[in-house]
Image: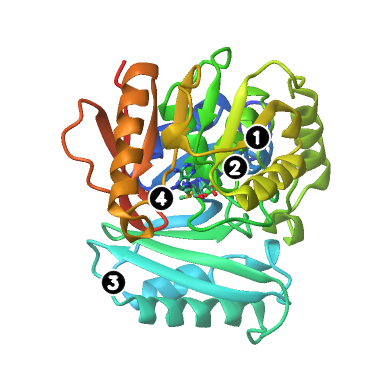
């Protein structure tokens, strides 16, 4: 497909965790992608190669970006085989990759995912005329069948996008970077207001907040799978990343504080912030939140919950959080049942566990 400027457009499919779809959709719109369709944990859009590299570099909230090689109605295995066999895989792959075929099916005639996987694998290998290798670069192909529409997707991400590259050490139950960024977005932080995370662990929420405020693209310090694929255009990626670097706002304009009761976590958080290039924007301290003086501005936090704490500690922490968030804005994410409290909440998953983000509705 070609657009007005003769730049080829692709269909791009982006996955995210449940609850973050609206944030990813907004990212696609901001980057100028078109024909955006949002479904559960899935956003698809049309975009140029530049949009494809921009999504990888700029998306704070998504998990993976795929290019859609084909989408068509498929209701039997012969058609699945022929469709995959008819694709020109050599445009994308060299045959020296280790290919992993994944499959998911919803409300469709073809529903046995192991068979979908094996039929697809046979079709791909016969086109590439190669056996699957056990070494070589790992490339994931996802066969997604929804309502009998099969989407053949090639992963161009590699490590999922929450892996920004700055967090080499983490404490117990660290929050994923994209979820931390989403909490900052949901809390509607105005960058001129001070922000604090009083139970910061490895510092993820504070780091992501500063990255958002300073407009630091989250994918600037990492590698993407597309860089090893045949159609990769290093000049376009370079240009996208140079532009992203030129858009970073200078340090020193924000008041973000991060504290934790555990001095070791503060050491880890400092290092992570340094690697992310935002250590100059975060004030770190060791302290017990429950007995700390009220901080200025909004609080965004991810406290420990469940059996990780003694009951009396839990009560004290949640009472203080409900009071502070109620008075100061912000929010906190937990799976702990905190009962009636006057705050609004949004269902999210944290590390596969159902949680709620409790916040003060504006
Ligand atoms: C779930 S972890 C936070 C993880 C963090 N969001 C991250 O990405 O690494 C909760 C943190 O709360 C800290 N904590 C527990 N009780 C505390 C208290 N009373 N005051 C301050 N921090 C506390 C723990 O040391 C732990 O690092």
Query: In the rendered structure, are the residues bearing label 4 and label 1 in contact, judged by CB atoms less than 8 Å apart?
Result: no
Q: Which residue is mark 2?
A: 203
Mark seen at residue 89: none
Q: Tag 1, which secondary structure?
A: strand
Observer able to see residue 19? no
Separation of marks 4 and 2 at Cα, in angstroms: 14 Å
Other-residue count near label 4 (Cα within 10 Å), few / some / many at <14 / 14–19 / ≥20: some
Q: Position of residue 134 (x, y in %)?
A: 66, 85
Task: Name the residue nearer the viewer: 184 or 244.
Answer: 184
Q: Which residue is mark 4?
A: 304
359 shown above or below 317: above
Q: Position of residue 297 (x, y in %)?
A: 49, 17
Determine whether, in the image, residue 186 is placed left or right of residue 123.
Answer: left
Q: Say if disc 2 is inside 8 Å of ligand 1.
A: yes
Q: Which residue is mark 3?
A: 110
Q: Which residue is mark 1?
A: 284
N-term mark: 1 or 2: 2
N-term mark: 4 or 1: 1
């Amino acid at each position: 497909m070609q657009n007005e400027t003769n730049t080829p457009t692709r269909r791009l499919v982006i996955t995210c965790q449940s609850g973050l779809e609206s944030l990813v959709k907004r990212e696609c719109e901001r980057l100028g992608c078109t024909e955006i369709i949002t479904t559960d944990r899935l956003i698809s859009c049309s975009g140029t190669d530049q949009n494809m590299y921009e999504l990888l570099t700029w998306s704070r909230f998504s998990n993976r970006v795929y290019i859609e090689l084909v989408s068509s109605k498929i209701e039997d295995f012969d058609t699945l085989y022929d469709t995959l066999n008819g694709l020109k895989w050599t445009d994308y792959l060299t045959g020296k990759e280790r290919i992993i075929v994944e499959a998911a099916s919803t409300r469709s005639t073809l529903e046995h995912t192991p068979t979908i996987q094996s039929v697809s694998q046979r079709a791909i290998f016969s086109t590439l005329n190669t056996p699957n290798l056990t070494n070589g670069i790992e490339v994931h192909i996802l066969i997604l069948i929804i309502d009998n529409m099969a989407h053949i997707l090639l992963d161009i991400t590699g490590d999922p996008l929450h892996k920004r590259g700055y967090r080499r050490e983490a404490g117990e139950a660290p929050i994923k970077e994209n979820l931390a960024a989403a909490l900052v977005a949901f809390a509607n932080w105005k960058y001129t207001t001070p922000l604090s995370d009083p139970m910061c662990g490895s510092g993820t929420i504070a780091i992501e907040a500063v990255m958002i405020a300073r407009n630091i693209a989250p994918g600037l310090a990492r590698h993407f799978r597309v860089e090893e694929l045949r159609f990769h255009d290093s000049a376009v990626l370079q240009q996208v990343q140079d532009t992203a670097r030129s858009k970073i706002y200078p340090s020193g304009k924000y008041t973000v504080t991060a504290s934790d009761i555990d001095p070791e976590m503060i050491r880890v958080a400092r290092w992570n912030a340094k690697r992310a290039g935002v250590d100059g924007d975060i004030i770190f301290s060791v302290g017990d939140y429950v007995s700390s003086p009220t901080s200025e501005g909004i609080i965004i936090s991810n406290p420990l919950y469940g059996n990780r704490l003694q009951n009396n500690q839990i009560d004290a922490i949640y009472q203080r959080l409900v009071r502070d968030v109620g008075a100061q804005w912000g929010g906190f994410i937990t799976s702990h049942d905190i009962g009636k409290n006057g705050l609004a909440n949004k269902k999210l998953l944290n590390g596969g566990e159902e949680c709620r983000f409790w916040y003060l509705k504006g």
